[in-house]
Image (cartoon, rainbow, N blue to C red):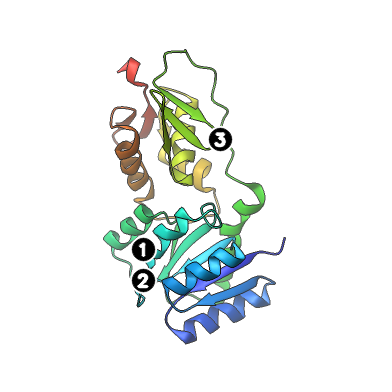
């Protein structure tokens, strides 16, 4: 498969460094110096993967990520922040904006290529395998519509970002089962993708904001489970 990768960074030497190494691997590479330019290119080429710097002029990486997630050409693209900022709040903000992963600068060429290869695996295979949801009782207040990637709550449709949907679908597949954090990482992000320690917590918090706080129960020190409202 001929992968299309969009690199967005305001430092020309970084753009060239990454472009050169990814071109050697056979990827089709596009570059942009800021978020506004990135959105235009993304609309034209529909990249499979976007590498995004945080601190940029005109439109920073966080806002660019939010806008990319709203575009049909990139709503399902893999987005990874490539930044020297390693503070916890920055990573949390990145996942809030819709990012899939974080890669810290500086990064060695072989490490970068390995991370990119791992991130792109999900493009071939699609979303990680989530167990099929068993038929539930008719009075369930939350319904997962896998074909349309929608959640229906009491008749109202709720659109979730891809990773949030996959996380909810996993928990929903076995109500009351406590999923360990490692199980969640493997099922939703895959073994080969390295994500921050707080990734699950951020996605759980955002899920609760979207669907309500009562559906996902925290089992301290263990993991999370799904509980429908009528069971609360």
Q: Do the residues labelled 1 and 3 touch (CB within 8 Å)?
A: no
Residue 193, given in percent of the width and then of the height, sits at: 52, 55
The residue to which callout 2 is attached is 59
Q: In this view, does 11 lie above or below 45?
A: below
Identify which residue, 190 or 133, lies in the foreground: 133
Element type where label 3 sits in the image: loop
Q: Nearer the viewer, mark 3 or mark 2?
A: 2
Q: Residue at x 34, y 51 (%)?
A: 198
The residue to which callout 3 is attached is 130
Q: Do the residues labelled 2 and 1 touch (CB within 8 Å)?
A: yes
Indicate left or right for 20 with 174 as reference: right
Marks 3 and 2, how far apart at CA: 35 Å
**Mark number for residue 114?**
none
The quadrant of the rendering that contains the N terminus is: bottom right
Q: Quadrant of residue 172?
A: top left
Q: Dot 1: within a 10 Å radius of its alpha carbon, few (fewer than 14), some, or many (20 or more) residues?
A: some
Q: Which sits earlier in the primary sequence, circle 1 or circle 3?
A: 1
Q: Residue furthest right?
A: 1
Q: Residue at x 28, y 34 (%)?
A: 220
Identify which residue, 88 or 169, lies in the foreground: 169
The residue to which callout 1 is attached is 63
Residue 2 in sight from this viewpoint: yes
Q: Dot 3: within a 10 Å radius of its alpha carbon, few (fewer than 14), some, or many (20 or more) residues?
A: some
The quadrant of the rendering that contains the C terminus is: top left
Q: In this view, does 170 lie above or below 69?
A: above
Marks 2 and 1, how far apart at CA: 6 Å
Marks 1 and 3, how far apart at CA: 30 Å
Q: Dot 2: within a 10 Å radius of its alpha carbon, few (fewer than 14), some, or many (20 or more) residues?
A: some
Residue 106, given in percent of the width and then of the height, sits at: 43, 77
Element type where label 2 sits in the image: loop
Q: Which sits earlier in the primary sequence, circle 3 or circle 2?
A: 2
């Amino acid at each position: 498969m001929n992968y299309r990768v969009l690199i967005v960074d305001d430092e020309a030497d970084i753009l060239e460094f990454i472009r050169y190494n990814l071109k050697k691997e056979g990827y089709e590479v596009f570059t942009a110096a800021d978020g506004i330019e990135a959105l235009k290119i993304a609309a034209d080429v529909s990249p499979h993967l976007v590498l995004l710097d945080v601190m940029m002029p005109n439109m920073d990486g966080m806002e660019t990520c939010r806008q990319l997630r709203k575009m049909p050409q990139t709503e399902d693209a893999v987005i990874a922040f490539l930044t020297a900022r390693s503070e916890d709040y920055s990573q949390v903000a990145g996942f809030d904006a819709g990012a899939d992963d974080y890669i810290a600068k500086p990064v060695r060429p072989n490490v970068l290529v390995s991370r990119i290869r791992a991130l792109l695996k999900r493009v071939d295979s699609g979303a990680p395998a989530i167990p099929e949801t068993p038929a539930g009782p008719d009075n369930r207040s939350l319904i997962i519509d896998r074909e349309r990637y929608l959640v229906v709550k009491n008749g109202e449709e709720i659109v979730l970002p891809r990773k949030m949907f996959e996380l909810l679908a996993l928990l929903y597949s076995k109500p009351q089962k406590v999923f360990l954090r490692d199980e969640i990482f493997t099922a939703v992000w895959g073994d080969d993708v390295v994500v921050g320690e707080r990734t699950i917590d951020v996605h759980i918090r955002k899920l609760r904001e979207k669907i309500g706080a009562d559906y996902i129960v925290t089992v301290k020190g263990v993991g999370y489970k799904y509980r429908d409202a009528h069971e609360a």
